[in-house]
Amino acid sequence: MGSKTPFYDKHVESGARIVDFGGWDMPLHYGSQKEEHHAVRQNAGVFDVSHMTIVDLAGERVRAFLQFLLANDVAKLKDYGKALYTSMLNEEGGVIDDLIVYFLGETAYRLVVNAATREKDLAWIRRQAEAFDVSVSERPELAMVAVQGPRARELAAPCIDAEFRDAALALKPFFGMEAGEWFIARTGYTGEDGWEIVMPAADAHGVWDRLVAAGVAPAGLGARDTLRLEAAMNLYGSDMDETISPLEAGLEWTVAWEPADRDFIGRSAIEALRNSPDRQRFVGLLLEDKGVLRNHQKVVVQGVGEGEITSGGFSPTIGRSIALARVPAGDYDRAQVEVRGKMLNVRIVKTPFVRNGQVRIDV
Amino acid sequence: MSELPGDLLYTNDHEWLRRESDGSVTVGITDHAATALGDLVYVELPEVGQDVDAGGEMAVVESVKAASDVYAPVAGSVAAVNDDLSDDPEKINADPYGDGWIVRMTLADALDESELMTPDEYQQLLDELDD
């Protein structure tokens, strides 16, 4: 048996199929992964994301610390509550993790990092923090849900204390706010509008019941994966890891090159790759033949070379198979993928595949 | 879990087999298998006329989550395939023992029922998996 989140009993009550995820007993689905996927695209769904690791940082030099620790630059965070997506690199320029950092004050930031990378992340952050005299506090006592979908905020708003409700509804995308003991952010991992809400574990059951009663569909890790794939959001461990540069994982947009004199961990290593003609591409694929693309399948580009699917699956919104893949440098827009000995045709497409309920590629 | 049809035979790999009046057999996957895979999105069917060994890979069913082989429960050749599954693979989830059939086979040898499981034996296997 793995660790259980404060929502575990609710998952069982809702008929969840429970699976191990990074040491946690988490819901894979509650009957139909596809229906949960569609509920999020068309209405609203709720995900238990309490397994994710919340880390609060405090100290006079916390900004300087994060400017050194992270590839993106927290100097971009000027307004209270603003969030920034970034990778955290090792000295060799490989990705230790991807995370969101929230600006909560001149001396206080909150990080949300992946569950499966919790231990190594905490060890790394603590080690780097020593020189900056920054305190690093994990917050395992907190519960967290992601309420996602076009109607998510409307349906979840009644759960929020009346004192904070209007302010929460007024949050702009990629902003968060403290709301008493809660933390509410207009962020997510689905390509839909919505909130991620952090709360004391004692509030978890009541919130879950109210959301479900309001018509928000419980959604499991399965739907979370197909939704994030359609939104072309990277999954740590599949699309990138410690051996992969963010520049070859579609994450260059999260690397702040300016100011040029900001020295962050991994900078010199990835700068060497920055203008390299051999730098691999990270692309979206649409399968033109019948079948399903899966992780680790080989991508063949005639006359150019080979690559690999890093995340592949079936897109319930498009009704076709899509994938993210790392492929050789070069100018081309077609390739083939080897599936059980057969070569299937794929087209390279501009991601995201789906955003805000709309298919964004030519099918 | 719904009740197992009593007129079918079953395999360890969660296929079912129905004896047809013309001596051929129809093959599909059980409700247990379909439920475990989740919503099916693609079925790779064999060519009609293809020979298959008992236990050999005959088709592939893919759900949103994963791909899974369907094995031939007996040796024979493929007499027909359920082409409807190409456009509507979820028929397997909706009606695994009926519209969700996958392949009809003509047998290479007389059917040896002792190689397969009765509904009671298969139910026992499912009960053990639940424990």
Image (cartoon, rainbow, N blue to C red):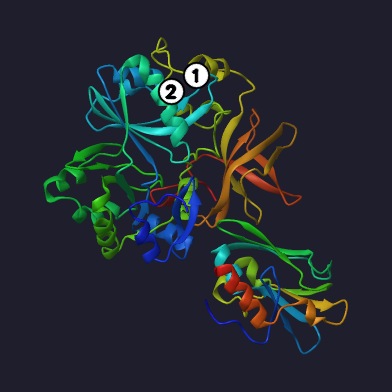
Residues at badges 1 and 2 in contact (C-beta under 8 Å)? yes
Residue hosting label 1: A266
**Quick check: B34 above or below A100?**
below
**Disc 1, SS:** loop
Q: Please give the label number shown on residue A191.
A: none
Residue type pointed to by label 2: Ala
Residue at coordinates 25% horizontally, 39% vertically from top-left?
Answer: A172
Residue at coordinates 24% horizontally, 41% vertically from top-left?
Answer: A183
Query: Dot 2: within a 10 Å radius of its alpha carbon, few (fewer than 14), some, or many (20 or more) residues?
Result: many
C-alpha span from label 1 to label 2? 8 Å
The location of residue A228, given as percent across then percent down, is: 46, 46
- For the residues beneath circles 1 and 2, the answer to whether they share a chain is yes
Residue type pointed to by label 1: Gly
| Closer to the camera in the image, A37 or A3 | A3
Residue A184 appearing in the image: yes
Query: Dot 1: within a 10 Å radius of its alpha carbon, few (fewer than 14), some, or many (20 or more) residues?
Result: many
The location of residue A235, given as percent across then percent down, is: 50, 40
| Closer to the camera in the image, A288 or B72 | B72
Residue A195 appearing in the image: no
Residue at coordinates 15% horizontally, 45% vertically from top-left?
Answer: A164
Q: Which residue is the extreme one toward the bottom? A: B21
**Disc 2, SS:** loop
Residue hosting label 2: A71
